[in-house]
Image (cartoon, rainbow, N blue to C red):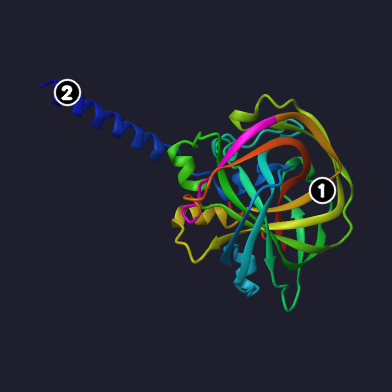
């Protein structure tokens, strides 16, 4: 009898967990994109030395016929974590997902495009809405940013089901001039709220454009892909890096292709860049 009661409780709790996961609906692409800002810390680390085939997910780049890219993933360069700018919070539907978007960004070796691809970018975050459209030209992949968890704490199940398939290829750019701008940054990830809010000034050079990709033809659930494919981020370098009190973090890979790789201890103590959401060629993510 007791065993039956325990089994019933386990089943009930499992059913409630499943309902909770289903109840956490994915945000719309535009809600997710507008609130997605990531502060990147310099965290040099070990090399993976893994060959990966990257294919584009973004409809604009697919329509332009950008080819698949074979890259070799080298050493860890940066760890990027979610922030809000000037106390402008993400949409409530997007915040539970955005606060768990953490990336380990690795340098990659990759061949340049035979024909560099020009694009016109426009800012999506309301804080930067007054900054002008600007032209960039994609030259070659320079980094691969892959999803990670911190200190063994996984995102909630519904959020994990989304973020584990969010990978970015960051391209070296021939970038048109862009105004310098300054923002105030506040941490969004629950594990990093102890990092004090701080200002950062971003300069026009160097810059990267980070676009969603899949690795080795990996199957991505359609509902997840419908959002991830629109999440493009332009990376601006800080005019002067921001030093903070050191925070020790252990990174754990989330993407199924990398989930068995070793965990990586890093120290967050110097913020060097900011990733901000952009649209390409006037194609705004759908609502």
Q: Nearer the viewer, residue 192 or 13?
A: 192
Label 1 or label 2, whichever comes before in sequence order: 2
Q: Is residue 250 magenta?
A: yes
Furthest-bottom residue in this view: 114
Judged from the image, the secondary structure of the residue bearing numbered disc 2 is helix
Judged from the image, the secondary structure of the residue bearing numbered disc 1 is strand
> Mark 1 packing: few (<14 Cα in 10 Å), some, or many (20+)?
many
Q: Nearer the viewer, residue 163 or 245?
A: 245
Residue drawn at 82 percent across, 33 percent down? 199
The answer to whether 226 appears left or right of 131 in the picture is left
Say which residue label 1 marks: 237
Q: Is residue 78 above or below residue 268?
A: below
Residue 235 pos. (x, y %): 75, 51
Residue drawn at 48 percent across, 43 percent down? 160
Q: Is residue 109 above or below residue 191?
A: below
Q: Is residue 88 above or below residue 230?
A: above
Question: Overall secondary structure of the magenta stretch?
Answer: strand
Question: Quarter-wise, where is residue 229 in the image?
Answer: bottom right
**What residue range appears in magenta?**
247-257
In which quadrant of the rendered image does the N terminus lie? Answer: top left
Say which residue label 2 marks: 5
Q: Is residue 261 magenta?
A: no
Residue 268 pos. (x, y %): 70, 36
Residue 64 pos. (x, y %): 65, 73
Question: Quarter-wise, where is residue 116 in the image?
Answer: bottom right
């Amino acid at each position: 009898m007791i065993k039956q009661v325990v089994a019933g409780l386990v089943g009930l709790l499992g059913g409630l967990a499943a309902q909770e996961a289903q109840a956490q609906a994915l945000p719309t692409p535009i809600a997710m994109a507008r609130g997605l800002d990531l502060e990147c810390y310099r965290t040099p680390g070990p090399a993976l030395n893994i060959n990966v085939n990257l294919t584009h997910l973004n409809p604009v780049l697919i329509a332009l016929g950008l080819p698949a890219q074979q890259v070799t993933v080298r050493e860890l360069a940066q760890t990027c974590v979610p922030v809000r700018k000037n106390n402008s919070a993400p949409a409530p539907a997007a915040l539970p997902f955005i606060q768990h978007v953490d990336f380990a960004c690795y340098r990659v070796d990759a061949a340049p495009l035979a024909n560099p691809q020009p694009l016109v970018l426009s800012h999506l975050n309301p804080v930067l809405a007054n900054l002008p459209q600007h032209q960039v030209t994609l030259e070659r992949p320079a980094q691969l940013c892959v999803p990670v968890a911190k200190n063994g704490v996984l995102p909630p199940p519904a959020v994990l089901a989304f973020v584990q398939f969010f990978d970015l290829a960051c391209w070296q750019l021939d970038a048109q001039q862009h105004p310098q701008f300054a923002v105030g940054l506040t941490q969004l990830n629950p594990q990093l709220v102890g990092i004090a809010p701080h200002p950062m000034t971003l300069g026009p050079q160097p810059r990267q454009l980070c676009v969603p990709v899949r690795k080795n033809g990996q199957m991505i659930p359609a509902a997840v892909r419908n959002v991830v494919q629109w999440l493009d981020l332009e990376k601006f370098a800080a005019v002067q890096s921001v030093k903070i009190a050191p925070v020790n973090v252990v990174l754990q890979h989330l993407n199924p292709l990398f989930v068995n790789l070793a965990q990586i201890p890093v120290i967050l103590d110097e913020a060097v860049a900011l990733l901000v959401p952009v649209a390409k060629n006037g194609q705004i993510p759908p609502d």
